[in-house]
Each structure stands twice: as C-alpha cells, then as structure tokens.
Amino acid sequence: MRRRDLLAAAPALLALPAHALPARSLRFPRDHGAHPELRTEWWYITGAVDAGGRLFGFQLTFFRSRVDATQDMASAFAAKQLVFAHAAVTDVQGRRLHHDQRIARAGFGVAGAETEDTRVRLRDWQLARGEDGVYQARLPARDFTLELRIAPTQPPLLQGSEGLSRKGPDPSQASYYYSLPQLAATGAITLEGRRFEVQGKAWLDHEWSEALMHPQAVGWDWIGMNLDDGSALTAFQLRRADGSPLWDGGSFRRAGGAAAIAGQGQTRFSAQRRWTSPLTGASYPVEWEVETPAGRYVVRALLDDQELDSRASTGAVYWEGLSDLLDGQGRRVGRGYLEMTGYAQRLRI
C-alpha cells in the first residue's frame, strides 16, 4: 500500500458502528501490549525534563489502527493494521516547538505492536518495556532525537471504572484506559545537533477502544498532571461544536493512596486566555480554570504555540503542550501536559 493510500485509509477507520465494551479486569503485563482486535489504540508519554536549568517538554505517541475493510483479505500485503507515531519537543527557553511524524502499515519488519507487552516500533522509532518495568524510547526525528529511560515509581492508575472509561452518553463510547503517572525520566534530547542530558518526570497513558466519539462531539480537552507532592490529576471533557461540554471525567490519586474517580458532571473546564494559530487560524484556550472533585486549579501553557499538524499521518491538527498547574492561590503545584483537539477541524476517531 502506497503512502497516499495509507493516508486515505486513516479516516475510513472511524465511521463504523461499535458495540459497548464489557467490563473486565486489566491484567499486566499482558495489557501493556497491543489489542489488535479493537479498532484504535495508543501509547502516549509526555514529560517535563531539565538539562542543567534548561527546561524541555516532550511527547511521544504510537498509535495502532485496525483497518476493517482489509481484515478478510488473504494477501500478506493487505494493510490490516496501521501504525502512526508522533514525537515533539518543547524548548521552553528557545520558545519553539519541534515535532515530527511517521506512518506505515504493520508488518514486514517495518512497523508493529506486540501483544505480550509494550513493544511498538515504526521504522527507527521504538518504545519497549523491559522485564523490570522500565520503558526505553528512541525516536530520531528530523531535527531532534529522543533517547529516554522512563521508570515507574507508582502502580498503574486505572481510569474510569476499574479501567473502563466512559467517553460519552452511549455505553459504546468508552475505552480501556490506564495511566502511569510520576514516571522518572532520564536520558538525552539531541536538538539541532546539540545533546542535552536530561532528567525529570513523565506520564504514560495507554488506551484502546472500538469507539470514543459521540456523533455530537467535535473534540476534547484533557490534562495529565504530576503534582509536586507525588499526587496525580487527570481531567477531561468532550465538547460539542458550540463549545458546550458533552461528557467529562477524571481522577485524582495521592501518592500511596487510592484513586478517586470523578463522576459525570463533576469536572468543569472554563477557558481563560486564548491564542490563535497563525498556521490554521484555530483559537485555543492556553489557560484554563479546571474545577475537579480534588479542587479548583489553573492550567497555564508554558508556550502558546504548541500546535501539532499531523495531517500527514493521523490526519488531525491538535494542540499538545507542556503546562503548569496552579492552585487557587496561584502557586505552582505541578506540571504536565494539556491536550486540545477539534479546534482546527472536527476530530474523527
């Protein structure tokens, strides 16, 4: 399948009807691996790392998508699974976002996602989890390279109801979803030929589903925040075209404690300052007030322009960026990532 055919196939993954996912117990390490029987899956790691006083944010995401139209084809060349990947570095002091993307069909040693544990690759980009639970990531991109060791310090945080996370009013709009917050990240970022030894904190989300988006939903807003005291905060909302919330949720877990899962209607996002992209004309709230059962916070982007144009792979344009978390008194209490989709165009997934 040629590259343009891969790109054409990506939106076609999205429109078929889906059934409600059954409740099930997540099992590890098996559920760290791929689930090719379901339509959409991603392994998503974000983090904030320091290089002797220079602050970087990073994102690496591997996506797997099942192509329904090819599942009954006998040919070994049929693109039954597609693998996409995104990588980005936010250079806070340099005031610039660097990003790159990949796409390929699974197989032939080019790309794939193994089922036994996290081992995903796309040409020379790879993410693998070792028997010790530590993730190794290496992604050489156009003008940067990520070489990171990412080690868990806390057990998995099961989102939703024991790992089954509702994303809309219809039970079919749900995913299996867990997070690994407060990851210890070390390694190197090479940026425009200069190598920086880095260390800091990261966050991993692994999510797989048949369908996420209600027909009225155009996109979502999401935060994953590592608090300085070891706590972890997740909050999200799905939005209608007029900006009103369609569904919301989230979680909060103190270090060493049990997770408190937010019920529908308990999380509210209120847009504050906005930034308009000169590339797409999309207007993104780069500062939010977020009300959660764990308290009211302000989320503030460290760099306004963290918009990613991934139309050459997943077909989407979205904002994904390093942000600070402030408490009600304006004190920084954490740092993590803010993701906003569906502002430049309706998200289809």
Image (tube, grey):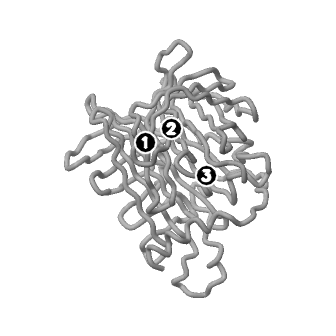
The residue that mark 3 highlights is 207
Residue 277 image label: 1
Instruction: Determine crowd level at label 1: few under 14, some 14-19, many 20+ residues with C-alpha closer than 10 A.
Output: some
Q: Tag 3 or tag 1, which sits nearer the N-term? A: 3
- Whether residue 110 is situated above or below residue 124 in the rendered picture: below
Query: Which of these two is toward me, 213 or 84?
Result: 213
Identify the amino acid type marked 1: Ser
Q: Tag 3, which secondary structure?
A: strand
Identify the amino acid type marked 2: Tyr
Q: Tag 1, which secondary structure?
A: loop
| Residue 348: percent from left, percent from top | 61, 57
Residues at marks 2 and 3, CA–CA distance in whole angstroms: 25 Å
Residues at marks 1 and 3, CA–CA distance in whole angstroms: 29 Å
Residue 89 appears left or right of 250: left
Q: Are marks 1 and 3 in contact (CB under 8 Å)?
A: no
Q: Tag 3 or tag 2, which sits nearer the N-term? A: 3
Quarter residue 2 falls in? bottom left
Q: Tag 2, which secondary structure?
A: strand
- Whether residue 289 is situated above or below residue 29 in the rendered picture: above
| Residue 110: percent from left, percent from top | 42, 72
Residue 284 image label: 2
| Residue 137: percent from left, percent from top | 39, 53
Task: Specify the quadrant that holds the C terminus.
Answer: bottom right
Quarter residue 109 falls in? bottom left
Instruction: Determine crowd level at label 3: few under 14, some 14-19, many 20+ residues with C-alpha closer than 10 A.
Output: many
